[in-house]
Image (cartoon, grey):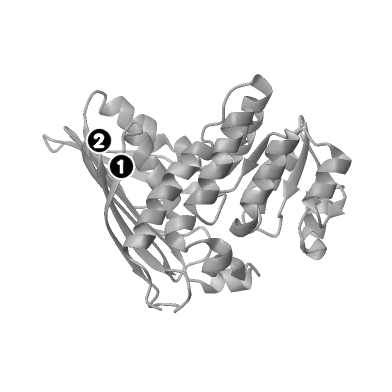
Amino acid sequence: MRIVLIGVSHWHTPFYSTPLLAMTDATIVGVSDPDAARAAPLAGKANCPVFTDYREMCAKLKPDFAFVLGRHCDMADQARFLIDCRIPFAIEKPCAVNGAEAQDIARRAASAGAFAAVPLVFRYCPIIDTIRELAAGEHIQYLSFKFVGGMVDRYYQQNVEWVIDRATAGGGPLLNLGIHFVDLCRLLLDNAALTVTGAMMSNRAAGLTIEDHAILLMCGGGASCMVETGYLYPAPNSVFDMHYSIRTEKHYFAARDNSTLEIVTNDRQRTTREMKLTNVFFYPEFVRDTLRRVRDGRPPIADLTDNAAAVALIETAYAMSPLPA
């Protein structure tokens, strides 16, 4: 497969390029970014040309598949272009800066029958199958996900300041990180309709136009849900202050680090399972699985409709708890 990458100055680019460069049945044939210098190192590794205009790249190279990154404010237009060109693609969450854009591209993709994957990569997390295995037939009563990442200085260091500006990012850690867990709540509750019941946003730590700490409360499907995210933890990339808790009728599942799940039954029997529990582990699988799915004519593991549903809930939370002017 002939692959192009769009917006490669995004800090997630290695999550895609590294597995792609190792594949024997896929080749990176072009990379694009408005800043050609930012794209040059990857182009050197892939031995492919650099473009500053993704439209020109796609017209010239006619790729079989595109991985779309870049600024959130550019993503909806990129998606519309690829849908119109009938180029299958995967696009980084949240795919847009607001619910209207996210819904628009979801409708366009569905109408066109486009393959449009979204890396809501926690769908590959073994915690899902573990809950379904051990608590089969049990109703989930409570879900809580805390996922607090590094402070905003890391985005300055990576020259991606756009992600901490509401105008170009659409939101802060709730949109950038919390979307994974809003999606997990929807998935584990079998896509039950969720209602936002409370929200708290704060920008006290960094004083920016985005929140640097957020708490989202939801209910639906007989369960209560809480998602807490932030840019507060003095830690390097991909290291998080994290804790997950899921209560079913007869089990309590808890993750207190990135590799161990604790399972406690109602009769107080405790076991643990080793498994990967943070997002970075699952991107290589997403890349490989997504390309298999498009080859086989199967739908992606998550699509623009799934993304739009999560963005809509997050947008409701932002409206409920606006930041101080």
Place of residue 64 in the rendered image (x, y in percent of width and height, measured from the top left): 77, 32
User: Marks 1 and 2: in contact by CB < 8 Å?
Assistant: yes
Instruction: Let me know if residue 180 appears in the view.
Output: no
Residues packed near mark 1 inside 10 Å, few (<14), some (14 to 19) or many (20 plus) = many
Q: Is residue 280 above or below residue 9?
A: above
For residue 221, side relative to residue 10 (left or right): left
**Location of residue 211 with respect to 301 vertically, above or below:** below
Question: In the image, residue 229 lies at what x, y percent?
Answer: 38, 60
The relative height of residue 2 versus residue 16 in the rendered view (above or below) is: above
Q: Is mark 1 on a helix, strand or loop?
A: loop
In the picture, the quarter occupied by the N terminus is: top right
Q: Position of residue 264 (x, y in %)?
A: 20, 39
Instruction: Tell which circle, 2 or 1, labels the residue nearer the N-terminal end.
Output: 1
Q: How far apart are marks 2 and 1 (CA)?
A: 7 Å
Q: Which of 261 and 36 is in front in this view?
A: 36
Q: Which residue shows up at 42% across the image and 46% down it?
A: 310
Dot 1 amino acid type: Leu
Give the left or right position of residue 258, taking residue 95 as reference.
left
**Quadrant housing the C terminus:** bottom left
Q: Mark 1 points at which residue?
A: 194
**Of residues 266 and 33, which is closer to you in this image?**
33
Looking at the rendered structure, the kind of residue marked 2 is: Gly
Q: Which element type, helix, strand or loop, lies under badge 2?
A: loop
The image shows residue 263 at horizontal and vertical percentages of 25, 38
The residue drawn where x is 66% and y is 43% is 80
The residue indicated by pointer 2 is: 221
**Can I make out residue 237 in this image?**
yes
Q: In which quarter of the image is residue 162?
A: bottom right
Q: Residues within 10 Å of mark 2 (few under 14, many from 20)?
A: some
Extreme-left residue of the structure:
267
- Residue 230 drawn above or below residue 19: below
